[in-house]
């Protein structure tokens, strides 16, 4: 894990909205997966405002990280410079829709979109300060949230009850798919109103929904209605 930074406060709703808008730029917001390497190399540099992105393939990255974003104070053509160091195997595997590589790239895209050179790094030995850092102020938390939302948007996640099927459909690992379905459950259960359908498992009408997903407050089952 990279050294964390304190950044501008963003909650998951803000990050989800940004991730969805950037997916739409690629023209694949309803597709289960897309060429994330093309997005990184072509779409993002041409669409992002105020930043000049340089992608640098290299085998040598500090702490043996697979990828690392750094922002430079000096400017290029009037724009803030942003360097992405990336091990070549990441790009090769992402082109083949490798789950780990796609998540790593999505995470770094999150840094490039959400952050800048004003981020405040935490140096080693500052554990006490990190304990009081809210998730919404953590650069790593934000980038992870962006990757989840970018790779598996809510409107797609809400159509699945089985994490393994969602993982296969969107080319993400099982843990990512589980997080996406759990978020849909949490959103649905916050709804004040019931959907009006009955539970297929217990027959109870206390179903709460988000998108196509319905969750029963009585037995806890999860089903979808299309």
Image (cartoon, rainbow, N blue to C red):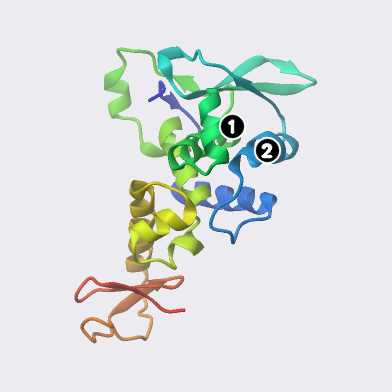
Between 47 and 128, the one lying in front of the other is: 47
SS at badge 1: helix
Quadrant position of residue 38: top right
Q: Quadrant of the N terminus?
A: top left
Residue 27 visible in this rendered orientation of the protein: yes
Q: Badge 1 local density, few (<14 within 10 Å), some, or many (20+)? A: many
- Above/below status of 111 relative to 201: above
- Above/below status of 179 relative to 190: above
Residue 138 visible in this rendered orientation of the protein: no
SS at badge 2: helix
Going by the image, does 9 lie left or right of 214? right
Q: Nearer the viewer, mark 2 or mark 1?
A: 2
Going by the image, does 40 lie left or right of 78? left
Q: Position of residue 93 (x, y in %)?
A: 51, 35
Q: Position of residue 164 (x, y in %)?
A: 35, 57
Q: Badge 2 local density, few (<14 within 10 Å), some, or many (20+)? A: some
Residue at position x 63%, y 56% in the image: 28
Q: Earlier in the sequence, mark 2 or mark 1?
A: 2
Q: Position of residue 130 (x, y in %)?
A: 32, 25
Residue underneath mark 1: 112
Q: Position of residue 165 (x, y in %)?
A: 39, 60
Residue underneath mark 2: 44
Going by the image, does 90 lie left or right of 205? right
Count every numbered label the image shows and give the total: 2
Q: Quick check: marks 2 and 1 in contact, CB under 8 Å?
A: yes
């Amino acid at each position: 894990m990279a050294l964390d930074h304190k950044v501008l406060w963003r909650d998951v709703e803000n990050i989800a909205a940004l991730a969805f808008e950037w997916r739409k730029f690629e023209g694949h917001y309803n597709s289960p997966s897309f060429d994330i390497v093309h997005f990184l190399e072509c779409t993002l540099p041409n669409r992002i405002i105020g930043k000049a992105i340089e992608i640098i393939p290299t085998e040598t990255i500090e702490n043996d990280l697979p990828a690392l974003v750094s922002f430079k104070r000096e400017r290029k053509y009037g724009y803030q410079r942003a360097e992405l160091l990336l091990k070549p195997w990441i790009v090769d595997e992402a082109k083949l829709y490798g789950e780990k590589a796609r998540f790593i790239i999505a995470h770094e895209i999150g840094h490039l979109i959400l952050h800048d050179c004003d981020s405040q790094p935490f140096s080693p030995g500052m554990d006490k300060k990190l304990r009081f850092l809210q998730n919404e102020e953590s650069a790593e938390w934000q980038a992870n949230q962006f990757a989840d939302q970018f790779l598996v948007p809510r409107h797609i996640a809400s159509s699945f009850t089985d994490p393994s099927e969602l993982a296969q459909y969107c080319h993400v690992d099982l843990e990512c798919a589980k997080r996406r379905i759990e978020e849909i459950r949490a959103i649905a259960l916050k709804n004040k109103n019931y959907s009006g359908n009955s539970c297929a498992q217990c027959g109870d009408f206390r179903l709460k929904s988000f998108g196509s997903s319905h969750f029963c407050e009585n037995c806890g089952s999860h089903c979808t209605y299309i």
